[in-house]
Amino acid sequence: MHEINANHSSLQMKLIKKYLKFKLMEDKVKFKDHGNERKHIYDLITRSVLHGESHSALIIGPRGCGKTTLLNSVLHQVSKEADLVSDAIVIKLNGLIHQDDKVALKAITAQMQLENAVGDRVFGTFAENLSFLLSCLMSGVDRRCKSMVFILEQFDMFCHSARTQTLLYNLFDITHSKQAPMCVLGVTNRIDVMELLEKRVKSRFSHRHIFIFPNEEGDGCEAKSPLTNYKEMLVHCLSMPLALGRRKETPRVRKGRKSTASMEEKMDIDITYSEYSIPDQVLIKCRTDIKQFQYLESGFLEDWNSHIQSLADDQKVLDSLEKLCYYTVNEQIFKDILFQTVSKLSPSKPYIDAIELSNTIENTVSPEQRVKLLQSLSILELSLVIAMVHGLEIFDGQPMNFEMVLHRYTKFANTNSSNQSVPRPVVLKAFEHLQQLEIIMPSKGADHSVSDANTSRVQKEYKLYTLAAPIHDIKEALKSYKALPTEINHWFNNSID
C-alpha cells in the first residue's frame, strides 16, 4: 500500500513539473495588463486582415516586458475571428538573423511558400523581387492580394546599414503607396530607434509608436508596484488550473460513454477559460496531449495552489523579490529562476522551499554580477585591486594614484619569487583597464578651487582614484576565483605591512 501511494504521488509530481515547465518556457501567448496598447495593436492587425488597410507601427519597451508575447496574444485572438491561413500571411523576421537583404528575401519567400514560383529567376533589385512575390499572391477576378502582417523583431538591427534599410524602405513604401494590404510592426527596446532611420525610410513610416513599460498604469487602474507585479507573477506562473484535476468519485456506470464524453467536453471548456491554464496551441506546438494530465487529482492541485499562495506571502521570498525589482524588470529572468526551482522538485521533495527560492533569487541580483566581473580580471589586475585595498586602509580611505598602487604591488612582487616581474607599461595598461570597467573611479578632490583645466593637465600616473568595488564583493570573488595563486590569497588576508 505504501508503494502504491509513493508511485501515485510520484506520478502527480511528475505531471505537475511537466505542466509548469511548459507554462514557464513555452507559453508565449497569454498576456495580461496593457489593455490600451493591446487594443491599439489589435485594431491595426484586424484592419489589415479584415478590411485590407495598410499600417505600420513600432512597439518599444525594455527587454522582457512582454512585447513579443503581446503580439502572439493578439494574433491568437485574431485567428479565432478570421482565417489567417487563407486570408492573411504572418511573416516574422529577426534583425539578429536577417540583417542581409538576400537572407531576408529567402526567409520571406519561404514563409510565403513561394520557393517554386521564384525558382531560378534573377531580379535586378530588392524591390523587383518583392513586387514579384506580391504578384504571386494575387488571386480572384479582381486580382486582390492577401493581407500580410510583417513582424520585425530586433528592429534596431535592421537600421545599422544601408543594405538592410532597403528592406525597411520597401516594406514601408508598400504600406505608404497601398500596393497591397500590409501591416508592418517593428519590435525594439531602443527608444532612440527613429534616429537610426534614413530620411527616405522615415518619410514612408507612419510614425506610430506604441510604448510598453512594466508596472505602468492603464485601463483606469492604479499603477502596480514592481513587488506586487512579481508576486502576482509568482502565483500565476506556479499555480495549476483546478479544472485539470479529476475527482476521486467515479461517475456512474449506467451512463456509459455519454457521461465520459460530456465530462471531457466540460473539462476542455474549464481548461480553456482557466486563469492558470496553458493555451491549446502551445500544447499542440509542444506535441503534448492534454489528456495525459487527466490523472491529476483535484485535491492534490488544491494543496499545491495553497502552497504556492503561502510561498508568495512568505517574508523571505518577498524580501528577495524586492531586491529583484531593483535589479531588473525582465520577466524572462524571473521565469528562468522559477524554472530552476521547479526542476529541483521530486517525490522526496514535493514542495518548494522558501529559503531555497530566496537563495536562487539572491544569486541572480546585482552583487553576484559584480563578483563575476571581478572574477573575470587577470591576476595582475586583481593584484592591483588588492594593492589598492591595502593602500586605502593605510591612508585611511584617502584616494590613491597609480604610483602609490604600483609601489604597493612592487613591494609584494619583490617578496614573492614565484611572481614574474611585469614591465611598468603593462601594469599601467592594467590600471587603465580597471578604470574602464569602473572598478576604480576618478576621485573628486576636496579642493574645489582647482579648476578642471588644471586637473586635466595632471599626468595620468598622478591622477587620484578611489576603489568603487565593495570589499565584501572582492572577498567573495577571491573565494571562488579559479587558479588563484596562494600567495595572492594570503596577501589579501594577511595583515598590512
Image: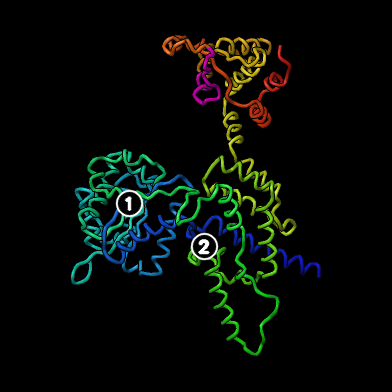
Amino acid found under the numbered disc labelled 2? Cys
> Based on the displayed image, in which of its 4 quarters is residue 347 positioned?
bottom right
Q: In this view, does 63 lie above or below 464?
A: below
Q: Where is residue 45 in the image (x, y as percent from the top left)?
A: 34, 60
Mark 1 is surrounded, within 10 Å at the Cα level, by few (under 14), some (14 to 19) or many (20 or more) other residues, namely some
Q: Is residue 493 left or right of residue 178?
A: right
Residue with the most extreme bottom position: 254
Residue with the most extreme right position: 1
Sequence-wise first label, 1 or 2: 1
- Residue at image position (64%, 27%) is 474
Q: Is residue 442 magenta?
A: yes
**Colour scheme of the picture:** rainbow
Which part of the image, by quadrant, shows the C terminus? top right
Q: In this view, does 182 lie above or below 82?
A: above
Q: Is residue 139 above or below residue 478?
A: below
Q: Where is residue 241 in the image (x, y as percent from the top left)?
A: 60, 66
Between 410 and 266, the one lying in front of the other is 266
Closer mark to the observer between disc 1 and disc 2: 1
Between 235 and 380, the one lying in front of the other is 235
Residue 335 can be seen in this image? no
- Residue at image position (55%, 12%) is 401
Please tell me how many numbered marks the rendered image carries.
Answer: 2
Q: Position of residue 171 (x, y in %)?
A: 26, 51
> Based on the displayed image, in which of its 4 quarters is residue 271 positioned?
bottom right
Which part of the image, by quadrant, shows the N terminus? bottom right
What secondary structure is found at the residue carrying circle 1?
Answer: strand
Q: Is residue 416 left or right of residue 443?
A: right
Amino acid found under the numbered disc labelled 1? Ala
Please state the extent of the stretch shown in magenta in the rendering.
Answer: 432-446
Tag shown at residue 57: 1
Residue labelled with disc 2? 286
Mark 2 is surrounded, within 10 Å at the Cα level, by few (under 14), some (14 to 19) or many (20 or more) other residues, namely few
